[in-house]
Amino acid sequence: MTHPLLIVGAGIAGLWTALKAAPNPVVLLTGAPLGHGSSTGWAQGGVAAALGPDDSAELHARDTVMAGAGLVDEAAATVLAEAGADEVRALYELGAGFERTEDGGWALSREAAHSVARVARMKGDQAGAGILQTLIEAVRAAHHIEIKDGWCAEALLPDLKEGCAGVLARDPDGALHRLAAQHTVLATGSVGGLYAVTTTPWTSQGQAMVMAAELGAVIRDPEFVQFHPTAIDIGRDPAPLATEALRGDGAILVDRSGHRFMPDVHELAELAPRDVVARAVHAQNLSGKGAFLDAREAIGAAFPDHFPAVFKACMNSGIDPRTDPIPVAPAAHYHMGGIETDLDGSTGVPGLWAVGECACTGVHGANRLASNSLLDGLVFGHRAANTIKRAPARAVSAGVAKAPPELPDDALQTLRAAVSAQVGVIRTGAGLNQLLSLIGALQAEHGPAPALIAARFLAVGALQREESRGGHSRTDFPARHGLAQPTRLRVYDISNARLKPCKAGAA
C-alpha cells in the first residue's frame, strides 16, 4: 500500500501540517507517544506575530532580519511575518487559550530584539503545552489522520526512480515496517540532544537531517545553534527553562554579588539578542562570578500564577524565585540550520518535504528572533500542506533501506559532552578538529550512528565558517565577514559520514 502523505513528527509543525492537509488522507508517525518527546510542549514564551495596534508585519519582518545577523532570507521573513497573525488567530479559534485583555485585545509580551510587545502568550509560560494539547485534541478528532502512536522513523525509503518513497519505521514493539508514501514530510525537531546541556528532549539528535542527507538533500547552516541564555542551572537533563518573558517583564541578570552586568555588555541590556546574552552569561559563569536571573522585584509574589512552570522547576530544586535569584547558564535550545527547503517545504528531493525546526528556509539566519520558532512551524507547515495538496500524484517504487546502528549510552554521553565543549557558545578551530577526531574514533567502533553524522555536520559547518556571526562565535576568528554566505553541505558517502561543501546556491 502506498500512502498519499506520511508525516514524521508530532510537534507543532507536524500536527499543523497534518491538520491543514485535510481532506487528504494522512498517516502520522509520532516517534514517542503522542504528547511526549516534542520540544513544542516545553516552549514557554509564546508565538510572535503582529497582533498589536503598534505593530505590523513589516516591523516584525525587519526585527527578524536584524536579529539574524545578515543571514536571514528576507523573502522568508516576509512570508513568516505576513502570515503570522492569521495563524495565531486560527489556533485561537481551534481552542488554544491565548491570553486576551479586558477590552478584547491580545495580551502580548515583549522579548529580546523585538521592537514592540508581540508575543501571544498563555499564562506567562504555558504557551507550548497549551498549543500542543489543543493540536493533539484536534488531530485525534480529525477523520483524515491515521495516528501511528510511538512509531519511529529509522530511515527513508529511496524511490527506485528518483527521490523519496516513504520510510522504514519501527513500531512500539520493535518490529520494522516499510511504509511507502507519495509524499513524506519530516517534522522531527532539534539537534539539542547532541548537547550535554539542552532545553529540548535529549532524544532529538538531528535524525531528520541525517536521513534527508542520505537521499541527497542539502544541509544548510548546521553550525548555527541558538543557546538560550537562561536555562535554570540545577543539573537536570534536559535543563528547565527560565522563559525570556521574565526578562521582558523586568527580571534582570546579576552576578553573585548582586551586580547587574548586561548594561555593560549591550545597550538593550537583558533584552539584547539571545546570542549576546548567552555569551555574557557564559562568560560570567566561567569567571566564577556566576550568573543569576533576579525576578524578585519584577515578578515577586506573582510568580506562581504568572509563570507556573518556572516556579515549579525552581521550587523542586530548593529555589524560591520570589525571594532568591535563579542560577542560570546557556543551554542548546534551537537549531537555526537544518534541511534546506524552499518556502513551501520542498527539499529538492522528489517526494521529500521538511517543516519546523529540522528544516531551514533561511528565515532565522544566524540567530533566531525570540518566539519565531512556533510561528515557523505554523506558517511553513501550512504552506507545505497546501503545496502537497496541489501536487500531482506520484507513482513510487520503494527501494531498500536499513535501520542505522545505535550509539551505546556511554558513547552518546561522551559525544554530548564533547559537542557541548567544542560546538558550544564559544568555539575554536583546534577544539572542532578535536571533536571531529573523536567522532571518527566513535564511528570506527560503533558504525555510522545518526548522532555521529549529525554532530559531524555541526562541527564541519563550524570549522568552515572562519568568522563569528550570530550564534556561531570563534575566538580564533572573532570578526564578522563583510559578506554573509550560507553554509551548504551534502553527505556523499554516508557510511563514512564524509562531508563536502556545495557551491553557493546549490539545492
Image: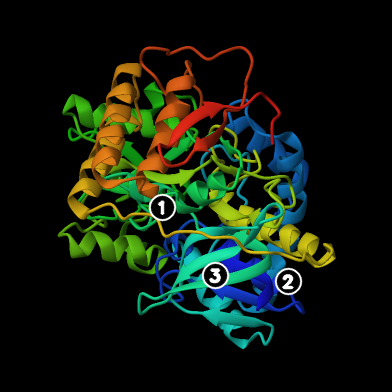
The mark nearer the N terminus, 3 or 1, is: 3
Three-letter amino acid code at the position of disc 2:
Ala
Residue situated in front as seen by the camera: 293 or 220:
220
Could you tell me the amino acid type at mark 3? Ile
- Residue behind mark 1: 243
* Quadrant in the rendering for residue 426: top left
**Which residue is depicted at the point 36% across and 58% down?**
201
Label 3 Cα neighbours within 10 Å, binned few <14 / some 14-19 / many ≥20: many
Task: Name the residue tied to disc 2.
Answer: 21
Asked if the residues shown at circle 3 and circle 2 are in contact, with their CB atoms under 8 angstroms apart, the answer is no
- Which quadrant of the rendered structure holds the N terminus? bottom right
The residue nearer to you, when weighing 336 against 308, is 336
For label 1, the crowd category at 10 Å Cα-Cα, with few meaning under 14, some 14 to 19 and many 20 or more, is many
Distance in Å between CA atoms under marks 3 and 2? 19 Å
Q: Secondary structure at mark 3?
A: helix
Question: Please, is residue 158 above or below residue 289 in the view?
Answer: below
Quadrant housing the C terminus: top right
Q: What SS does tag 2 mark?
A: loop
Residue 262 - label: none
Crowd around label 2: few <14 · some 14–19 · many ≥20 (10 Å):
many
Whether residue 194 is situated above or below residue 506 in the rendered picture: below
Q: Identify the residue under disc 3.
A: 131
